[in-house]
Amino acid sequence: EPEVTQTPSHQVTQMGQEVILRCVPISNHLYFYWYRQILGQKVEFLVSFYNNEISEKSEIFDDQFSVERPDGSNFTLKIRSTKLEDSAMYFCASRGVDRDTQYFGPGTRLTVL
Amino acid sequence: RKEVEQDPGPFNVPEGATVAFNCTYSNSASQSFFWYRQDCRKEPKLLMSVYSSGNEDGRFTAQLNRASQYISLLIRDSKLSDSATYLCAVGADSSYKLIFGSGTRLLVRP
């Protein structure tokens, strides 16, 4: 069964450093999403991406965040200058054209020291 | 009012019990509804989509009441392996972004 993959599974970084989180969505999907979950809190929407552009973003997704689909398979989330409060699980999700069900990757645990 | 609201639990039930979870949502224009299951420190895994007509998958039954803006999940004959957090999610806006509830924790004991 096709699945969403994410790398790395765990990223530790110093405050102020840039991080790039990578995702490979399900191959025939066209809609891509990033969510985050701070420990003990709910899953929160960050951004949606379709047709090589952002279709919607939340207020969390400020100028420090960016997304890119650099090639036909990868979908990345970049945080330019990490803050302590960026520590969370970051989940990528993808959705096909005809169905609105989103499938989630295993997540990247980001720890900012 | 929170966009998607769930009772956090935990629900502590014996094996074989029937347990029901409820979820309310505030946006009447919401278009799609889901139950996800999340194990500790793992990703949300789709349990089932929820339709107005109701749907059933084995021991799991989901219902949607659009008039009351209410979604439910019923688990029959609980198994130890059902222990997890159950997330209600509502698809919103043209991007179908998911708005999640805080989750309801289920503990099934022997």
Image (cartoon, rainbow, N blue to C red):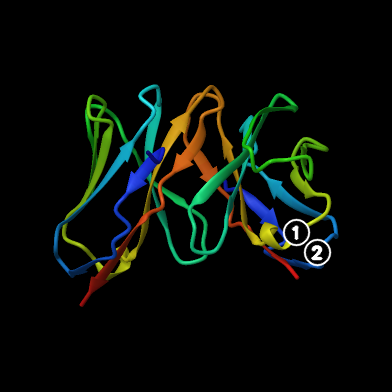
Instruction: For mark 2, name the chain.
Output: A
Query: Which tag, 1 or 2, sits closer to the chain's start?
Result: 2
Q: Is residue A1 visible?
A: no
Which circle marks residue B7 in the picture? none
Label 1, residues with CA under 10 Å away: few <14, some 14-19, many ≥20: some
Tell me the residue at 46%/67% (across/down). B40
In which quadrant is the C terminus of chain A drawn?
Answer: bottom right
Q: Farthest residue toward the front?
A: B1
Q: Distance between the residues labelled 1 and 2?
A: 5 Å
Tell me the residue at 64%/52% (across/down). A5
Tell me the residue at 38%/41% (across/down). B4
Q: Name the residue under label 2.
A: A15
> For this rendering, which residue is in front, B61 or A88?
A88
- Residue A43 locus on image (x, y percent): 51, 50
Label 2, residues with CA under 10 Å away: few <14, some 14-19, many ≥20: some
Tell me the residue at 61%/33% (across/down). A29
Q: Mark 1 points at which residue?
A: A83
Verify CB contact (< 8 Å) between mark 1 and mark 2: yes
> What residue type is disc 2 on?
Met
- Residue B101 locus on image (x, y percent): 40, 47
Instruction: For mark 1, name the chain.
Output: A
> What residue type is disc 1 on?
Lys
Q: Is residue A74 visible?
A: yes
- Taking A93 as reference, is B27 above or below it? above
Is A54 positioned to the left or the right of B37 in the image? Answer: right
- Residue A103 locus on image (x, y percent): 52, 43
- Determine which quarter of the picture holds residue B78: bottom left
| Mark 1 secondary-structure assignment | loop
- Taking B94 as reference, is B84 above or below it? below
Q: How many marks?
A: 2
